[in-house]
């Protein structure tokens, strides 16, 4: 009987606390609901604000999340959505599915990057809040084979996506459209 009275007292206290708590207004709800994040769900990464997802088959989802964050930090473009970086790094998951040694190497190197981040910031690389802090972590590994492989691979895998080209003012190849000379060769505004 005493334990029932204690339970009733706890419920009454919780109800009083909830009543004293201010209600969530619309502005607070919209602000909280619109916070962008890449969420790991099973074997997938889901971006809550940009409405995209990426199924990860061979690598650990945390590893893929770190690779995507590294890609954005290596070639940062505020006008590019995270999905373009995810597409650029998808080849790491695909190759890992075919080559166990490659997968082990990627997992080991990402674990090392996370260990460096944990030593300095007590959290994995992808959760380090400030870009400048993550860039400093990358500077520590920039001469290594792993970093150089990601950096050089991104030149093709990121910038060879036709959906990215308009962001930079590139219209694509011109031979099939009559060449550049007849299509505004002198109007290059982005250079």
Image (tube, helix red, strand yellow):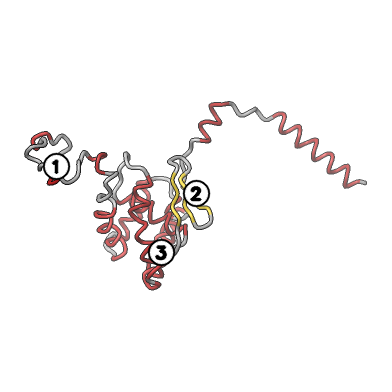
Estimate the x, y position of residue 101 in percent, counting from the top left: 38, 73
- Mark whose residue sits in front, 3 or 1: 1
Whole-angstrom CA distance, mark 3 to mark 1, is 48 Å
Question: Residue at position x 8%, y 37% from top?
Answer: 182
Estimate the x, y position of residue 42 in percent, counting from the top left: 53, 56
Residue farthest along the left direction in this orientation: 181
Whole-angstrom CA distance, mark 1 to mark 2, is 42 Å
Question: Residue at position x 45%, y 62% from top?
Answer: 57
The disc, 3 or 1, on the residue closer to the chain's N-terminal end is 3
Question: Residue at position x 72%, y 33% from top?
Answer: 17
Provide the residue designation for mark 2.
39
Provide the residue designation for mark 1.
177
* Number of marks drawn: 3
- The part of the image, by quadrant, that contains residue 191 is top left
Q: Which mark is residue 67?
A: none
Q: Answer yes or no: do the residues labelled 1 and 2 have beta carbons within 8 Å?
A: no
User: Which SS class for mark 3?
Assistant: helix
Q: Is residue 83 left or right of residue 188?
A: right
Whole-angstrom CA distance, mark 2 to mark 3, is 22 Å
User: Which SS class for mark 1?
Assistant: helix
Question: Residue at position x 33%, y 49% from top?
Answer: 73
The disc, 1 or 2, on the residue closer to the chain's N-terminal end is 2
Estimate the x, y position of residue 91 in percent, counting from the top left: 34, 60
As drawn, 56 above or below 51: below
Provide the residue designation for mark 3.
112
Q: Answer yes or no: do the residues labelled 3 and 1 have beta carbons within 8 Å?
A: no
């Amino acid at each position: 009987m005493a334990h029932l009275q204690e339970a009733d007292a706890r419920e009454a206290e919780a109800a009083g606390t909830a009543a004293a708590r201010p209600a969530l207004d619309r502005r607070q709800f919209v602000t909280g609901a619109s916070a962008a994040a890449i969420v790991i769900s099973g074997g997938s990464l889901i971006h809550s604000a940009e409405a995209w997802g990426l199924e990860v088959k061979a690598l650990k989802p945390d590893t893929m999340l770190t690779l995507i964050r590294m890609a954005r930090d290596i070639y940062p473009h505020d006008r590019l959505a995270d999905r373009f970086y995810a597409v650029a790094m998808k080849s790491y998951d695909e190759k890992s599915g075919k080559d166990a040694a490659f997968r082990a190497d990627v997992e080991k190197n990402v674990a090392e990057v996370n260990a460096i981040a944990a030593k300095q910031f007590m959290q994995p690389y992808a959760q380090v809040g400030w870009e400048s802090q993550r860039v400093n972590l990358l500077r520590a590994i920039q001469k290594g084979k792993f970093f150089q492989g990601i950096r050089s691979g991104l030149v093709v895998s990121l910038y060879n996506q036709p959906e990215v080209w308009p962001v930079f003012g590139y219209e694509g190849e011109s031979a099939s459209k009559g060449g550049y000379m007849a299509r505004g060769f002198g109007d290059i505004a982005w250079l």
